[in-house]
Every structure is written in C-alpha cells, then in structure tokens.
C-alpha cells in the first residue's frame, strides 16, 4: 500500500504539470498569433483546476489503469478560434506544435534537475532526495510520452492539425470530415484493436519505441549534468 501511494505521489504532480503547461502553451501561442479567446476565458493560467477534465483527466485514465489497458486521457482543450489567427493555416500548425514542444522543453528541464539532484545526493540517495529522483524520472518520461502521443495524426490530437496544415488545400475538406469521428477512431485504435489483436497495439508498437529512445537521450543529459556536479 505504501509503495502504491509512493508511486502515485511520484506520478500525479509530474502529470499535472505536464498537462497544464501543454494546454497553456497552446493558448499562449494562439494569443501571440492574434487569437485572445483562451485569455478572455481565463485559460492562460497555471491553475490546474482550470484545465482538468473530470472524465478525461481522472476517470478514464484511472479505469484504464485498473483494467491494465493502454492508458490515455485528455484535459479541457484550450479554446482557439482559427479564424482569428493572423494566418489560420500556419497559425493552427504553430498552436498545435506548441503543446508537444512545451513537453519536450519540460523534459529537458527535468533532465537538468535530475542530473543536479543526482550529482548532489550521490548514488545512494534515499528519503526526500530519492523521492525527488523518482519524480523527476517520471516527469521526463511523462512529458516525452505526452508530446509523442499528441503528435499522432488522428483528430483531435495536435498531430492532426499539423497534418492538416501540410496537406494540399483541396485535400483539407476531406480530412476535416474525419474530425467528428475522431474520438471513435481513437477508441478503436487504442482500445479495441489491442484487445482483439494483442500484438497490434499502437501504444506499444508506435509510441513506446520512440519514447524509450528519447528517454535514453534525456537521461544521457542528466548523466552529463550529474557528472559535472560531482
């Protein structure tokens, strides 16, 4: 029980920080590009209460975790009015990139902090230092996973807006018609397909390999910082 609580505590704070910065980054870049919708609605805040979706952030991931199924969820999307952006086509791509970009940046900050704490605490870190190291490791992993997960080219993920911006203009209407079915498509690809065909899970086969590759690179940065601190 204590181990479960320890793990939960090490995961929850990093997850909340990753989600909040992801959403605020969308709204901040949208404001820079001419759309102040998120700002007017009070969504350019680091207060997690303004971004947590009770179903998508808490209920769905919790149930999926208990069922040992691929865990995914969502926060309240930051509102962006595409037609208010100075260049809607390029603007939506930049707004979409901002979320995953913020997570990659946070992972870098986490790697520097991990290396700093490891260098100061030494190889036998325990207590507060040990908890900090565990939390920072998960912080890096969560941010990498969140970034790559959202780059999937499936509506309504950020990757779909990037793909839409890169498509020839004549192909955009057909792609936009997929958006209403986006959530159903996500459920089918992430839950139904792995359940029916266990070897074809998108999370395991598409997302986790690059997550692990990037995680190794970030941990390498942490090792460099730890060696410097030592």
Image (cartoon, rainbow, N blue to C red):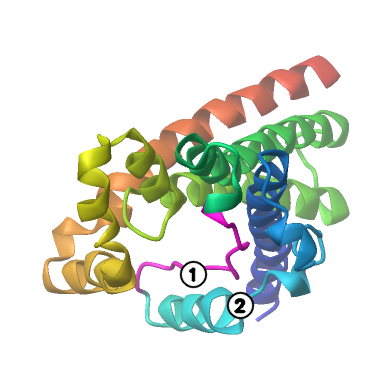
Instruction: Kindly check if marks 2 and 1 are in contact, taking CB atoms under 8 A apart as contact.
Output: yes
For the residue labelled by badge 2, is the local secondary structure a helix, a strand or a loop?
A: loop
Residue positioned 25% across, 34% down in the render:
168
Which x, y percent locates residue 5?
A: 69, 75
Q: Which residue is mark 1?
A: 73
Residue 52: within the magenta? no
**Where are the magenta residues, as a range?**
69-82
In the image: residue 152, left or right of residue 196: right
How crowded pointer 2 is (Cα within 10 Å; few <14, some 14-19, many 20+) is rated as some
Q: Is residue 112 above or below residue 45?
A: above
Quadrant that contains the C terminus: top right
Please give the residue where the numbered disc 2 appears in the rendered image.
Answer: 53
User: Residue 146, image x and y in percent?
Assistant: 52, 51
Q: Residue at x 67, y 32 (%)?
A: 108
Q: Is residue 120 visible?
A: yes
Choose the circle earlier in sequence order: 2 or 1: 2
Residue 132, given in percent of the width and then of the height, sits at: 79, 50
């Amino acid at each position: 029980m204590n181990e479960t609580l320890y793990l939960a505590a090490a995961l929850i704070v990093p997850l909340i920080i990753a989600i909040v910065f992801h959403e605020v980054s969308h709204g901040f870049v949208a404001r820079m590009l001419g759309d102040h919708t998120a700002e007017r609605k009070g969504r350019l805040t680091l207060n997690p209460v303004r971004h947590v979706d009770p179903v998508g952030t808490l209920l769905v991931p919790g149930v999926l975790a208990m069922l040992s199924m691929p865990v995914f969820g969502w926060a309240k999307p930051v509102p962006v009015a595409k037609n208010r952006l100075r260049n809607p086509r390029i603007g939506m791509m930049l707004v979409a990139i901002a979320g995953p970009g913020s997570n990659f940046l946070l992972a870098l900050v986490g790697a520097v902090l991990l290396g700093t704490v490891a260098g100061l605490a030494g190889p036998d870190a325990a207590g507060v230092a040990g908890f900090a190291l565990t939390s920072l490791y998960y912080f890096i992993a969560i941010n990498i996973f969140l970034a790559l997960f959202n780059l999937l080219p499936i509506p309504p993920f950020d990757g779909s807006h990037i793909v839409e911006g890169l498509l020839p203009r004549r192909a955009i209407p057909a792609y936009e018609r997929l958006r209403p079915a986006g959530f159903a498509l996500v459920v089918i690809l992430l839950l139904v397909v792995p359940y029916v065909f266990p070897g074809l899970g998108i999370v395991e086969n598409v997302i986790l390999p690059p997550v692990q590759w990037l995680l190794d690179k970030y941990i390498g940065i942490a090792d460099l910082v730890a060696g410097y601190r030592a």
